[in-house]
Image: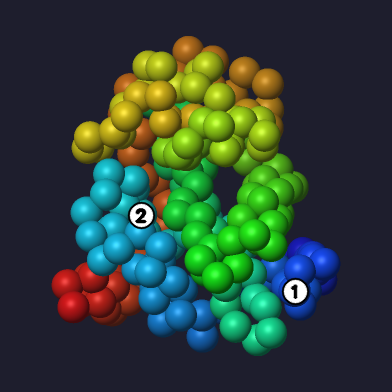
Amino acid sequence: MTAPRKPQIALSSKAAPFAIRNERAADVATREALLDACFGETRHGRTCQRLRDGRAPAAGLALAAVREGKLVGTVRLWHVSAGGRPALVLGPLAVDPACRELGIGAALMHQALAAARARGHAALILLGDAPYYVRFGFSAEKTGELSLPGPFERDRLLAVEFTDGALDGAEGMIVPTGAALPKRRAVRALQAHAA
């Protein structure tokens, strides 16, 4: 059994500190509202959502940023097979627009990367803007032969390896492999998306 981690606290000269902790069941409605605010209600039709639908995030890899008792940021990681190689996919990463200058997104990324590495995962993939994610070690160097189950911009498919060579020669479709949500939760998730 892993000892519980203390939440990461980040201080900013501009505002109150924020904490990063594991996501809780009570965060779901607020997280969904935050994701809608950041990505729009059409976010459910995006390509990477196909890797998450009906699946649970990887154990211990769903994080929330909280400031003054309010959820202001979220990031989740999911199990996938990247052309037959075990990996994680990150997303979505979202921060409340009112808090974007506080370093919450970067803190969530650093915490997610550290947690994934500590749990022994070999590689992490995401679909995002290279100029933002390169500072965390992501590149398109090993994703050129990988595909997603839907339209995507090739230069936005990025990866970072925690184990050297984890994605060497990886080619083919990235598909979900994580645990399926219990049917009741999956139905509620689909109903929430349709509403």
Find numbered disc 1 in the image and state the secondary structure of the residue it sits on.
loop
Residue 64 appears in the picture as rendered? no
Quarter of the image where one finds residue 17:
bottom right
Q: Position of residue 193 (x, y in %)?
A: 23, 70
Which color scheme did the rendering employ for the protein?
Answer: rainbow
Q: Which residue is mark 2?
A: 52
The residue where tag 1 is placed is 15
Q: Position of residue 38 (x, y in %)?
A: 41, 63
Label 2: how many residues lie within 10 Å, few (<14), some (14-19) or many (20+)? many
Disc on the earlier residue, 1 or 2: 1
Where residue 75 sits in the image (x, y, percent)?
54, 59
In front: 43, or 101?
101
- Work out which residue is located at the far left of the displayed protein and give it: 194
Judge from the rendering whether residue 168 lies leftward or rightward of residue 179; answer left or right: right
Q: From the viewer's perspective, is the residue at label 1 or at label 2 nearer?
A: 1
Amino acid type of the residue tagged 1 in the rendering: Ala
Q: Residue at x 67, y 34 (%)?
A: 135
Q: Is residue 34 above or below residue 27?
A: above
- The amino acid type of the residue labelled 2 equals Arg
Few, some or many C-alpha atoms within 10 Å of disc 1 (few <14, some 14-19, many ≥20)?
few
> Which percent across, then down, holds residue 155?
41, 24
